[in-house]
Image (cartoon, rainbow, N blue to C red):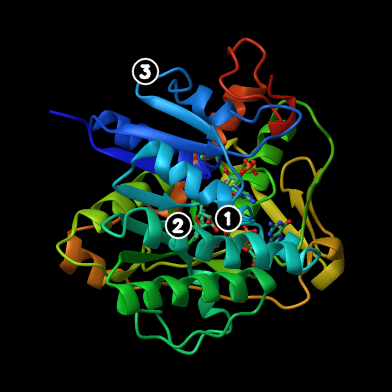
């Protein structure tokens, strides 16, 4: 029996790495695409121990290059395509709106066009985002909540989302969209607020006196655990027909709350002083400044609060989250502490750019 071949764009990212491991564990042949960089960026694949897996093939690719989108489909002979490659950082999208549109928006169309020509029977997963709800029109958000994007990233994702649905309806392509709420892990990039906090907490716990500089402490997110969400991506492509489904925990918490949990994991309680851009968080025992608000991390337009209802995903494909945000925070802090403790062998460089 020949193995099923899957293609993952963005395999060097958080979800790409976890999804690759998930598919390899199920016997798939996995083709993953990475961007050429002066320094290879395979630390997540190494951390998961799959970098040299015999059924993993890595291919250089950029989603903005249409020809390369055709070639990866032809070479991989994939029957399932998980399109995760994107400029995924909302904050940077305000500085790089056109680049974000090209990668995150139009890049998806290049892949869809290639599927339409090379093999229209391919099952396609689109990494849609809760950010598309933006200034929310209903609480909690579901598959029928109207969208109101509030960033160049969200607008680009919304375009890609509707293009995937258009290819489903126009050409009969099995294009499924997962509208995923924030999901985090020890493999999360350091720019994102959860990992920025857990990395900072571990740094402070191992001797640093530099506070964590954050933006809007009152923003609320529905945070889940990434390995559970990639299992949902796979389940979505195994359904009898294509769907659009929300993946979320149906609970929301503030950035402030996440920081309090993270410091508590290392035995420190925070007392908050001041308001707005002059707010600081201090250790109740020592008075040391642990958190400082820095307006540099405010966004020109903010998504204040997100909370998703995953009932349809449970009914349709049996998916439901297991790990709540507080437990997730503990997992992340412990992993970052292990990275900073010199006696612990590193499974991940302290900074992605230090990867060999
Ligand atoms: P990451 O930022 O960790 O990974 C993004 C991946 O896309 C990386 O492998 C990156 O490569 C790759 N990439 C960037 N630009 C290009 C390009 N021009 N061509 C090809 N690949 C490119 O994101 P996540 O793993 O967290 O997210 C995966 C997907 O899911 C993204 O599309 C994201 O927008 C979406 N999403 C994520 C959510 C989350 O909470 N994590 C929630 C909802 C949606 P490199 O390593 O070289 O930068
Ligand atoms: P988000 O995640 O924008 O929701 O996008 P991020 O962790 O960047 O921000 C969450 C919230 O925290 C606030 N915040 C800060 N954010 C960052 N990055 N850094 C800070 O210092 C900081 N201080 C406060 C933000 O303003 C925001 O409100 C993530 C990405 O994975 C997207 O790709 C994905 O589509 C969405 O989640 C769902």
Q: Nearer the viewer, residue 188 or 284?
A: 188
Q: Position of residue 228 (x, y in %)?
A: 34, 47
Q: Residue at x 30, y 66 (%)?
A: 173
- Relative to 326, is 154 on the left or the right? right
The image quarter containing residue 89 is bottom right
For disc 2, the marked residue is 114
Question: In the structure shown, which secondary structural element does the residue marked by tag 3 occupy?
Answer: loop
Helix, strand, or loop for circle 1?
helix
What is the CA distance from the residue labelled 3 to the residue labelled 2? 27 Å
Q: Is residue 308 above or below residue 53?
A: below
Q: Earlier in the sequence, mark 1 or mark 3?
A: 3
Q: Position of residue 240 (x, y in %)?
A: 14, 62
Q: CA distance from mark 2 to mark 1?
A: 8 Å
Q: Quadrant of the C terminus?
A: top right
Task: Bin the neighbour count of mark 2 within 10 Å (Cα to Cα): few under 14, some 14-19, many 20 and up.
Answer: many
- Identify the mark at residue 124; answer none if there is no mark: none
Instruction: Decide if residue 172 is in sight here.
Output: yes
CB atoms of marks 2 and 1 within 8 Å = yes
**Category of crowding for the residue at label 1, using alpha-carbon neighbours closer than 10 angstroms: few (below 14), some (14–19), many (at least 20):** some
Disc with the residue nearer the chain's start (3 vs 2): 3
Quadrant of res 305: bottom right
| Residue in front for this viewpoint, 148 or 51 | 51
Q: Which residue is mark 3?
A: 54
Residue contact between numbered discs 1 and 3, judged by CB atoms under 8 Å: no
Look at the image and tell me whether residue 186 can be seen. no
Q: Nearer the viewer, mark 1 or mark 3?
A: 1
Q: Earlier in the sequence, mark 2 or mark 1?
A: 1
Q: CB of residue at label 1: within 8 Å of ligand 1?
A: no
C-alpha gap between disc 1 and disc 3 = 28 Å
Task: Indicate which disc residue 66 carries.
Answer: 1
Horizontal side, residue 288 vs residue 149: left or right: right
Q: Residue at x 76, y 63 (%)?
A: 215
């Amino acid at each position: 029996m020949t193995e099923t071949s899957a293609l993952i764009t963005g395999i060097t990212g958080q979800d790409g790495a976890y999804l690759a491991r998930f598919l390899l564990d199920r016997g798939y042949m996995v083709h993953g695409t990475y961007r050429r960089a002066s320094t290879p960026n395979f630390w997540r694949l190494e951390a998961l121990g799959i970098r040299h897996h015999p059924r993993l093939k890595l291919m250089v690719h950029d989603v903005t290059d249409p020809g390369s989108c055709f070639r990866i489909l032809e070479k991989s002979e994939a029957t399932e395509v998980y399109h995760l490659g994107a400029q995924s950082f909302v904050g940077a999208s305000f500085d790089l709106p056109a680049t974000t549109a090209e990668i995150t928006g139009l890049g998806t169309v290049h892949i869809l066009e290639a599927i339409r020509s090379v093999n229209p029977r391919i099952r396609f997963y689109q990494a849609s985002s809760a950010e598309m709800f933006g200034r929310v029109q209903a609480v909690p958000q579901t598959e029928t909540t109207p969208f109101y994007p509030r960033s160049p990233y969200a607008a680009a994702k919304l375009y890609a989302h509707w293009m995937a649905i258009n290819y489903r309806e126009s050409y009969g392509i099995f294009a499924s969209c997962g509208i995923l709420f924030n999901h985090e892990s020890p493999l999360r990039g350091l720019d994102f607020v959860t990992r920025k906090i857990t990395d900072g907490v571990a740094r402070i716990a191992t001797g640093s006196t530099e506070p964590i500089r954050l933006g809007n402490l009152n923003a609320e997110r529905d945070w889940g655990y990434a390995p559970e969400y990639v299992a949902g991506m796979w389940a979505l492509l195994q359904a009898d027909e294509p769907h659009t489904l929300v993946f979320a925990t149906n609970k929301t918490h503030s950035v402030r709350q996440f920081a309090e949990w993270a410091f508590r994991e290392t035995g420190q309680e925070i007392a908050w002083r001041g308001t707005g851009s002059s707010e600081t968080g201090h250790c109740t025992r020592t008075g040391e400044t642990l958190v400082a608000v820095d307006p540099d991390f405010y966004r020109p337009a903010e998504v204040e609060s997100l909370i998703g209802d995953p009932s349809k995903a449970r009914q349709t494909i049996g998916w439901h989250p297991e790990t709540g945000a507080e437990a997730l925070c503990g997992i992340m802090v412990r992993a970052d502490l292990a990275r900073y403790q010199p006696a612990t062998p590193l499974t991940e460089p302290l900074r992605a750019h230090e990867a060999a």
